[in-house]
Every structure is written in structure tokens, then in C-alpha cells.
Image (cartoon, rainbow, N blue to C red):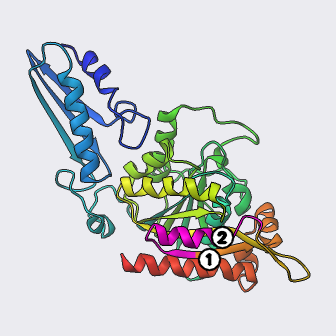
Amino acid sequence: MTSETIKEALKQVKYPGYSRDIMSFGLVKDISAENDAVAVVIELTGGSAEVAQEIKAQAEAQIRSLPDVKHVYVDVKDLSANRPAQASQASRAVGSSPNRVQGIKQVIAVASGKGGVGKSTVSANLACALTHLGLKIGLLDCDIYGPSIPLMMGVKERPSLSPNEKLLPLKNHDVKLMSMGFLLEDDQPVIWRGPMIMKTIQQFITSVEWGELDILLVDLPPGTGDAQLSLCQTVPLDGGVVVTTPQEASLGVVRKGIAMFRKVNVPILGIVENMSYFTTPQGERIEIFGSGGGQSESQRQDTTFLGKVPIFQEIREGGDAGVPVVAKAPESAPGEAFLSIAKSVQAELAKL
């Protein structure tokens, strides 16, 4: 019995809710085999006790299926708590995890089940709104394949290194920023497999000199794949904000995003409904994408409806110009919409 044979068997163990296996995620830390006995150590940095138990059961079953194996020992450790994988949401929220980044009080992920719902627009304006409310805010763009935060926040420079060789975040509108877009030439594509994405996101969290922040907002790519799981395994998340539009096509995949957060034990702060309606110059209200979907879905999911953002030309213009509407005109109607959502986020964090 060789370690390579055992590794091949463990490649059949999928992380619950994902198509990737625990070997490709780098969760298997030690393998030993002697005579008819096999021992494996698996380390998690997030997730619930149910996730740990499912991984343990799958791993044991795969190893037992190998010829000549009679004794199997699988040890699943949760590094987000100083005990076996039993960490609760409460313990994560108060900072018991050793993986918290020094100086960052809370980390919030902004997610969507699908693209095109304005998640990055919400992230940029939410960051500026929380800054307007007096908080120290960082914004991390984790959309490795399609980073849009550099454009929306009006930053084109490259980050420099600190004396201890950490990346120094760029800053605009009083928000500290980091994005893959700062490290690429214009229009240069990122053609990477999952492990490279995971490594980059881990470095953006741990190898950036964020300094003192009240909240680090993380703009996730659409979907529920490598980037999302990598973030959950790198740093304890204090909450997730889910962005949707009112129509059913968007709400259907929002449910998957909410299910993802719950699988990895991240509290749902609430749902933001973007592009809720459009008001014509004559005052007529047109609900292009339907009506009330975000609020009704919040009720179905037993989570908070954080607010709605109507379609305003100023929001699009601000994003294209690199000046989010909250930074330019916080007292305007679109600015007030984002400020109201920011206050709701604050209230939900206070409950935790």
C-alpha cells in the first residue's frame, strides 16, 4: 500500500456541495500506511461539524475499498477552532479563530448566484457608504477572471511592497483596495486552474498590509466555486450579503448562494435587491425585472431584506467614471439607497 494509491482514493472524496475533491483543495495534510493500517489527517479551516463528519465518512469509505486495508484512522481537524470540528457561529463571530487577520475586525463577503446582477456595483457603493458612516473599510476584489473594482473605484496604479514584503493596498474614496486587476496589463486574461485561484485569494487576505479596518468587504465572483470555498477556508467570515434582481431567473441561483454560505457556517446578513425598478422622466415607474422578488425571497429564506436599489443613470455613470455615486453624491436618491443598505448591514452585524 503506497501513499499515491491512497491519494488516488481520496480524490474521490468531494467537498460537500462542490465538484472539487479534498486532495485538489489541499485539505489532506498527512498520510501514513503500515501493513494493513492507514492513517490520514485532514485539516479544515471552516465549515460545520456536519461537513467534517461527511468528509470523514467519505474518506473512510474510499480507503476501506482499497485491497488489503483492514484498519482505517481518519482524523478531521478544524483549524478555525482550537478543538475538533465543532466551531459554532458564535465562536467564529467573536474571533476565536486563529486565522483571523490582525487588524481586521470583521470580514463580509458580497456574493451572487449569477453574473449580471450588479454585485460589484453594490460592493463598491456599499464600501463607500460604510466609509461615509465613519468606518474604516477595505474592499477586496476576488473576481480573479473578471475584476471590475479597479474601474468602479477609479484606480489604475500597481500596488507596492511594504518593508516586510507585503502588498500595500491602493486607496481611493477613503477605501483600501486590492484586486487582481491591479496586477495585470489592460485586457490581459487570467487563464488559471482552481488551485492557482485559491492560492491568490489566500495571498490577498494574508499577504496584504491591510492595517486597521473595521470591515473588509470581499467582492466574490458569481457562483459557488473555488473562490468562494477558498475564502471560507482562509479567514472566518462574519457574514454574507447576497445580491439579486427581482426576477425568478436570478432568485433561483440566489438560493444556491445562500445554501453555500450555510454549508460553510457563514451567517447570512441579508439580501439586496438591485435594479428593482426604473422611473421615467415623466414619473412612471417601470418594473423591468419584475416586482418584490428580493423581499419575498428574504422571507422564504428567513433572512433580512437589506433594501432595494432602483435603476439610476447616475449609478452606471459613477461606475464607469470610477466615482461611485455614494462618494460623489451621498445625499442623492441613489446615494441614499446605498446608505440605507449600509445601515441595515451595520444593524445585522450588531446582532452577531
Q: In this view, does 249 lie to the left or right of 218?
A: right
**Picture coordinates of residue 149 (x, y %)?**
67, 57
Mark 2 and mark 1 residues within 8 Å of each other at the beta carbon: yes
Q: In which quarter of the image is residue 254?
A: bottom right
- Name the disc covering residue 125, or none: 2
Which residue carries the number 1 mark? 129
Q: Give the range drawn in magenta.
A: 288-306
Q: Give residue 153's quadrant in the image.
A: bottom right
Q: Quadrant of the N terminus?
A: top left
Magenta stretch: residue 293 in it? yes
**Is residue 55 rendered magenta in the image?**
no
| Amino acid at dot 2 | Asn
Q: Residue 320 at what x, y percent from top left?
A: 80, 61
Which mark, residue 140? none
Q: Nearer the viewer, residue 62 or 352?
A: 62
Residue 316, x across and y down, in percent: 79, 65
**SS of the residue under disc 1:** helix
Q: Nearer the viewer, residue 186 or 83?
A: 83
Q: Can residue 165 be spotted in the picture?
A: no
Q: Where is residue 249 in the image (x, y as percent from the top left)?
A: 64, 54
